[in-house]
Image (spheres, helix red, strand yellow):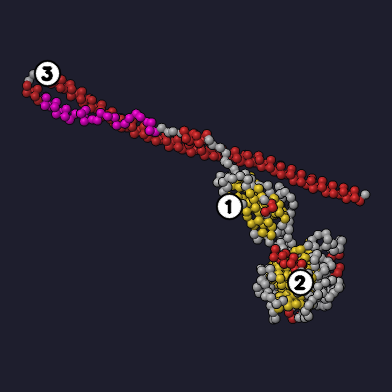
Amino acid sequence: MDSQKDALQRIIATLANKNEELQNFIETLNHTFGRVQDNSTQVVSDLEEEFDTLYSILDEMKESMTNTIKQESVRKSHELQNQLTQSTNALESAEELLEFANNALHIADDEEFTKAAKQIKDRVTMAPAFRLTMKPKATDNMTHLMVDFSKERQLLQGLKFLPVPRAPEIVLGDCLVIDNEVTITWRILEDSKIDHYILEYRKTNHEGLPRVKDEQCWEVLDNIKTSEYTLQGLRFDTKFMNFRVRACNKAAAGDYSDPVTLETRAFNFGFDSTSSHLNLKVEDRSVEWDPQGGKGVDSKVKGKENKGSAHFTNLKNMSSGTPSPKRTSVTRSPAPRGARDRFTGESYTVLGDTSIESGQHYWEVKPQKDCKSYSVGLAYRNLGKFDQLGKTNTTWCIHVNNWLQNSFAAKHNNKAKNLDVPVPDSIGVYCDFDRGQLSFYNAENKQLLHTFKVRFTQPVVPAFMVWCGGLTLSTGLQIPSAVRSFQKTENGLGGSNSSISQQDPSVACDICFYDKLPSVDSSLMP
């Protein structure tokens, strides 16, 4: 019966997944259908605009060339008209002279005849008819203004749609996600003249093919000249990222490649302002000492450490008690301002807003340059209101003190181990909950600073103390490859020997401590 129920549950899960796939596919088809109509309308509009531009150019050229022909016609007409006028006048003058000469032939008086002949001779010498050019100054030929459109006609008749590159193919096996960088590699399936590529990506929490209706927009990277690109300095604040690429020639962009989805899981959390001391000014990923923060509030509570109230903390806020470490890797635990995990007195502490219940996680903390005192580590959520990091058996930290007496130490259960290394500008924190390991690194060069070995008996939460200064938190980080390699080597050799032992059996530490540890000097704490 149980096996049949399990089989039915698997079938139901398969059907639910398939239904979700189909729903997403239908949304994609509807979206594509709508885009086809929109893009077709847009392309027709662009085509009409191009032809209108071409018509406009032709009209302009026609008008210009017509004006040239008209101007040439006017010039020739003017020249010929002038010649015609002059010739007509010359003809009239010649006809008059001819008549005068004919009449002179009939003069009987010799003296009168001689006088008329001389006059005719003088007039002939000056006659316009003998001074005119008998060649037209302009011809009737206009063929020099003819236009041969054969080449242009050929070009227009050969007009075709632009050649568009084919869609590239993303080579999933060559894509790489490491150290908060993503390298995407693709290939083009034809030997075409590609000018550049356009890579688009977006963050998502949905596995599988990209959804049409997603909460994130596509980010565009243009003018990529090679078939590989690396996105650097990413913050992985979603579980996955979608990628697609398209090729472009000098004229147009081709279709998108089939999209791919890459996993980008990382540990994301912020400072929990509901758990902070009143003298701490808290934002999502920064915390700063604020000496005026507790003014007017009865925050100077004096008395013994609140040991008893810490063990029924979340019973009012959580219906089922503490979640099992096997169910999820992290759990956000919002609490109202003023809850029992508000710190007071000299416990200038703030916790992270997300619990760690399993898996491996990494984050980094950068202090302000003038920060006088701060601690970075892990704690159980049952930390008392007056408890200070490193002074209880439920907290593990490294502590930096730049006030009165400089110190750099790893602390747990009111014991400390001085660290004989320079204090880094930024500290990386690595937690392997399942293996019970908490390590601190120089975030810049990944030098190991210290390792605690613990068997965690309940979920832990990032914990921070700051006094006279501030801290900036970097999350959404993958475990750096250098840290991962170091952890593999260390675990292969049986673990670190630079650890502080825990003497409380309820915490269950299984690593011996080799050196004699001094007690924590309370003067080192603010």
Depicted 49 relative to depicted 239: above or below: above
| Left or right: 205, with 129 as reference point | right
**SS at mark 3 in the image:** loop
Marks 1 and 3: in contact by CB < 8 Å?
no
The residue type indicated by label 3 comes to His
Among numbered discs 2 and 1, the one appearing first in the sequence: 1
Q: Is residue 52 magenta?
A: no
| Magenta region | 116-145
In front here: 454 or 137?
Answer: 454
Based on the displayed image, in which of its 4 quarters is residue 279 positioned? bottom right
| Left or right: 249, with 330 as reference point | left
Q: Residue at x 25, y 28 (%)?
A: 134
Q: Which numbered disc, 3 or 1, marks the residue closer to the eye?
A: 1
The residue type indicated by label 2 comes to Ser
The residue type indicated by label 1 comes to Lys
Q: Which mark is residue 106?
A: 3
Q: Residue at x 78, y 47 (%)?
A: 20
Farthest right residue? 1
Question: Label 3, label 1: how many angstroms apart (C-alpha)?
Answer: 106 Å
Q: Is residue 143 visible?
A: yes
The residue beneath circle 2 is 496
Task: Count residues near mark 1 (Cα–Cα under 10 Å), then give few for <14, some for 14-19, many for 20+.
Answer: few
Task: Count residues near mark 2 (Cα–Cα under 10 Å), then give few for <14, some for 14-19, many for 20+.
Answer: some
The residue beneath circle 1 is 225
